[in-house]
Amino acid sequence: MKPEIRKDYIQEKYVIIAPKRGRRPHDVERPERIKPQPKRACIFCAGQITKAGKSVLTVKANKKSEPWAIKVIKNKFPAVSIDNHKAYGHQEVVIETPDHIKEIEDLSLSQIIALLKVYAERTKAISRDKKVEYILIFKNNGGTAGASLQHAHSQIFATQFLPPHLKDKSQKSQAYKLEHGHCVYCDVIKKERKSPRLVFEDKNIIVFCPWASMHNYEIWIMPKRHLDNITLLTFGEQKSLASALKKILKKINRLDLHYNYYFHQVINDKDQHLYLKITPRGSVWAGVEIGSGLIINPIAPEAAAKYYRT
């Protein structure tokens, strides 16, 4: 495949897909993934958790041997807070398991579903704050993805400020709907389910590598129903999403790559199409990317999808 310039589904973002000749899809230069180390005085472990931050929500454990299943706390070092009018918002940490060694892909399906329910519950609660315009649920896995602590956790970040690129995306999505009469991402689903970028689908979700992937092995999980946000997922959709997430993260693990994943929600846009974006951190953005904003991705999404399917 020769290099090819591709445009994002809706925004003015461009990527050069430039596969390296003679390389297998999973043969990419990458930093070695650091394996979990034994706990010392981890602040997210059961004996230290009271020092980590004020508890917001606790999910009880099914096993008597565990102190809790999932715990949500206030971020002790927030970038935004409700008592700062110059940077107003909420910032919470979701500790996904009391086990210091386990990651999401090591958890049971029921535990991952419980995590999605926690995301939904906290999204619903934070949405009641009339000042909040934007909610981001995200996970940083590994140092190259921005994680500062090893113990499995994710975060919920909400502000009264809507990032400009999300405002632009919302406006372009609405313009598309006015012109075509339906959601751009519903059309993306129809297109990608017939493309070589399709990884998996069932009656609830579709999993695919996007046409203009900005990151090596970038992959999306999207509900087939037109859902505005995570609070609207049915149990069946949660189960499908959890199962797909577990399988994908195991595949990323085999690549020895760190990763980020995230959900967006623009509060005042009730016509969004929810999706979970997972971005493995194998990309190195250098002069071209930083200087021009044009991304070069050496892993074609078609090749990435083939890797995930096998």
Image (cartoon, grey):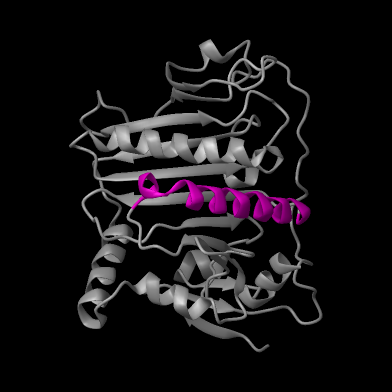
* Front residue of this view, candidates 129 and 284: 129
* Residue found at x 31% / y 60%: 272
Asked if residue 98 lies in the magenta stretch, the reply is: no
Furthest residue toward bottom: 2
- Counting every numbered tag in the picture gives 0
Q: Position of residue 99 (x, y in %)?
A: 68, 25
Give the quarter of the figure containing the N terminus: bottom right
Q: Picture quarter containing residue 223? A: bottom left
Q: Would residue 117 be found to the left or right of residue 28 on screen?
A: left
Q: Which residues are magenta?
A: 229-255
Give the quarter of the figure containing the C terminus: bottom right
Q: Would residue 275 be found to the left or right of residue 123 on screen?
A: right
In this rendering, the answer to whether 183 lies above or below 156 is below
**Residue 147 visible in the picture:** no
Q: Would residue 258 be found to the left or right of residue 267 on screen?
A: right
**Residue 45 visible in the picture:** yes
* Front residue of this view, candidates 290 and 139: 139
Q: Position of residue 282 (x, y in %)?
A: 66, 59
Q: Position of residue 249 (x, y in %)?
A: 67, 51
* Residue found at x 44% / y 38%: 119
Asked if residue 253 lies in the magenta stretch, the reply is: yes
In this rendering, the answer to whether 53 lies above or below 185 is above
* Residue found at x 25% / y 23%: 83
Q: Position of residue 24 (x, y in %)?
A: 80, 73
Which SS does the magenta portion mostly show?
helix
* Residue found at x 24% / y 39%: 132
Q: Would residue 237 be found to the left or right of residue 197 on screen?
A: left
In this rendering, the answer to whether 172 lies above or below 234 is below
